[in-house]
Image (cartoon, helix red, strand yellow):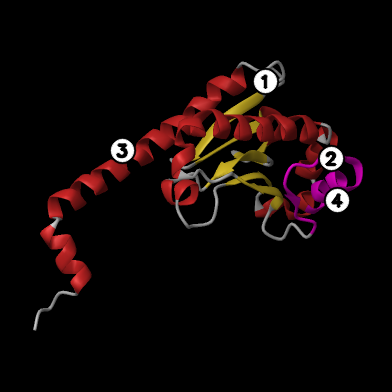
Amino acid sequence: MSIFSDESVLLIKNWEAVRDILNAKQRLEKELAQFLQSLEIDLKNTDWWQNKWVFNKQSSNSVYISKRDWKSDDEYVVWIGVEGFGPESLFGYESNATLYVWVPAKWHNLAVKLAEQVSEKESDIIGEIALKASSGFVIRHAVTQCLAEEIDSFEERTRSQIINFIAHYAHVIERYDELIKTSMAE
């Protein structure tokens, strides 16, 4: 009787291939992180970027933008970005990576107000509005997963989806600048 399951024996017998696959996965994760970082150049080349926007890297699989004016106590009050941008969420069976408009818990009331305002006043909504906004999310939208046969169009399609979402909500949320600044002062 062996201490190893059939699956473990299969891995052991093919350890060189397993090692190669694990190394390839690490490289893919780095390439996806570089892809996210490259979005900064695209955003900085838009006509609206000069309105005091900043690009922030939250982690290797999460980036967001905010405005310089929307910072309080070294924390940005409104984030517009993407999170969970990894191989499992883009190519596998885990939850999709998420595009979002988010407000930290400290400004929970602002998240609720923004969700209400966007819901009432905006006609072009991308994603789902979180009217309760208890998680801090104002809006969430899944990044489209990529099937193996679509890999050649991944970069263009995914870049376009992320940039379009961020640009759209940069314009939308910027209209509520006064509401944001008033909430920051409370």
Q: Which residue is mark 3?
A: 27
**Label whose residue precedes the other's in the sequence (4 or 2):** 4
- Secondary structure under badge 3? helix
Quadrant including the N terminus: bottom left
Q: Is residue 28 left or right of residue 96?
A: left
Q: Is residue 152 left or right of residue 171?
A: left
- Secondary structure under badge 2? helix
Disc 4 versus disc 3: nearer the observer:
3
Give, as a three-letter code, the residue at label 2. Leu
Q: CA distance from mark 3 to mark 1?
A: 31 Å
**Label whose residue precedes the other's in the sequence (4 or 3):** 3
Q: Which residue is mark 4?
A: 116
Q: Is residue 153 visible?
A: yes
- Secondary structure under badge 1? loop
Q: Is residue 59 visible?
A: no
Label 1 neighbourhood size at 10 Å, few (<14), some (14-19), many (20+)? Answer: some
Disc 3 versus disc 1: nearer the observer:
3
Give, as a three-letter code, the residue at label 3. Arg
Front position in the image: 111 or 123: 123
> Magenta stretch containing residue 130, yes or no?
yes
Q: Which residue is mark 2?
A: 179
Give, as a three-letter code, the residue at label 4. Glu
Please provide the residue range marked out in magenta: 112-131
**Label whose residue precedes the other's in the sequence (2 or 1):** 1
Residue at 91% over, 47% down: 120
Label 3 neighbourhood size at 10 Å, few (<14), some (14-19), many (20+)? Answer: few
